[in-house]
Image (cartoon, rainbow, N blue to C red):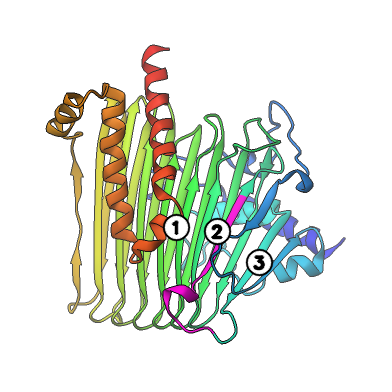
Amino acid sequence: MDLARADALAARHQLGVMGWIPRHSESFRHLPPPAADIWLGDAPPAVGCHAHPLAGAGWTLHPIGQSPQGRVDARWLDAGDALQRAELFAGLPMPAGAGEAGGDDAAPFAWAHRALCRQGLRMRIGATPGAGRGPSDTVWLQLRHQPRSAVEAPLLVIEVLAGVQAVLVETHDRQSLACQQPIVQNLQVHVLLGEGATLRHLRVAAPSPADRVAHHVHARLARGARYEQAVIALGSGYHLQRNVLGLQAEGAVARHAGLMLAAADAVLEHQVRVSHTAARTTSSVEDLALASGAARLVANAHTRIAPAAAEAEVRQRLVGIPTGGQPKLVLRPHLEICHDQVQATHGATWGALPEDALFYARQRGLDERSARGLIVEGMAGALMQRCFSDSHLLQAVDIDTLLRAAVARHLAAGEGARHG
């Protein structure tokens, strides 16, 4: 038996021993994920879907305008080949096994991924030779992913070398091709930041209404590294966005923002887990969660400050707004503080779209849907500005267009459910 096949079978065995995520799991208590056979491809899809890479399926790498590209080593690897599989998974931590310390509620997702993973992309981002560290020396890249099959487990590994500044726009929108059937996707992303490196990472995940999707982003930050990530996510049949951020060395900074939009009968869960294990580390987590119809949406933030994390600074802010109907919105901020010398704040706010702003927008001749869209876009734009420290970035990636499209789709789905 080849080594790649043996590794996949071992992962299935481990998953069988530890079992799938139980309904009483703390992280998933409000929205339990679909059963293991869905993610392993054992439950046959209604219609098959196989898209060829030459048609644009899988990962494709693109420049952003005329911006610098730096030195980018990108390798598309076949996880079915033993040597390529070893290169693809090199340096990544193994998921915790049954009964092992350090495990988490999402470990079964990681084992299911190892069992099914067939393709992956590893990127190493370096600086242009002779470049300094100013804004003009930032490496700008865009990654687009289109599904290759009805059930898939893609892998993305991003390594940013010491001192390098990079911007990455990662999109999953399914609008351009091939596989148009409902899909099941268990994506694992690993971000490794070297000493003093900076990555500003904008992710857009807009699955089709019947898709079942789980995206897991794991980031490890070295001394003085900075990771700013924002995600724009729309609900679907099941949609999980899970981020695990490890601030493992002094001076590391992580800022995360989520714009969560769920309408009709969609399901969407956003989980952010931040671990401060070194002194003078900083993190910020902010969510804007909007739901309508009979949608179910959970925003779940958990930050742990370890005993060694003196002078850590932590901030959590979760905002939930029903935009129509009777959705189920759950906000769960949580701090675990194991050191006295820290600064930490957290909170959850429920509310509605400001009536005065809606009134003034209507006075300008806008219909109700356009007025709501304008207000939500403004709130989302402010969220992005608070996440990214470089204001030039938002203009360069045309954030206004991205937000307008996501908000319009959300409001249209809510209107369709109301009149359907």
Name which residue type carries label 2.
Answer: Gly
**Would you place residue 125 above or below residue 77 in this image?**
below
Whether 139 is among the magenta residues is yes
Looking at the rendered image, the disc whose residue lies closer to the viewer, 1 or 3, is 1
Residue at the spot of label 2: 65
The numbered disc on residue 180 is: none
- Left or right for 359, reference 152: left
**Depth check, front residue: 128 or 16:** 128
Name which residue type carries label 1.
Answer: Ala
Pinpoint residue 111: horizontal percent, then vertical percent. Answer: 61, 56
**Depth check, front residue: 21 or 367:** 367
Tell me which residue sits at (31%, 77%) in the image.
281
Start-end of magenta stretch: 131-144
Question: Is label 3 in a helix, a strand or a loop?
Answer: strand
**Would you place residue 132 above or below residue 205 in this image?**
below
The numbered disc on residue 396 is: 1
Check contact, mark 1 vs mark 2: CB within 8 A: yes
Name which residue type carries label 3.
Answer: Arg
Q: Quadrant of the N terminus?
A: bottom right
Quarter holding residue 146 = top right
Check contact, mark 1 vs mark 3: CB within 8 A: no
Residue at the spot of label 3: 122
Tell me which residue sits at (31%, 48%) in the image.
381
Tell me which residue sits at (22%, 77%) in the image.
339
- Left or right for 222, reference 144: left
Tell me which residue sits at (42%, 66%) in the image.
245
Q: Residue furthest left?
A: 356
Q: Quadrant of the C terminus?
A: top left
Q: Alpha carbon of mark 1 to alpha carbon of mark 3: how far?
A: 25 Å
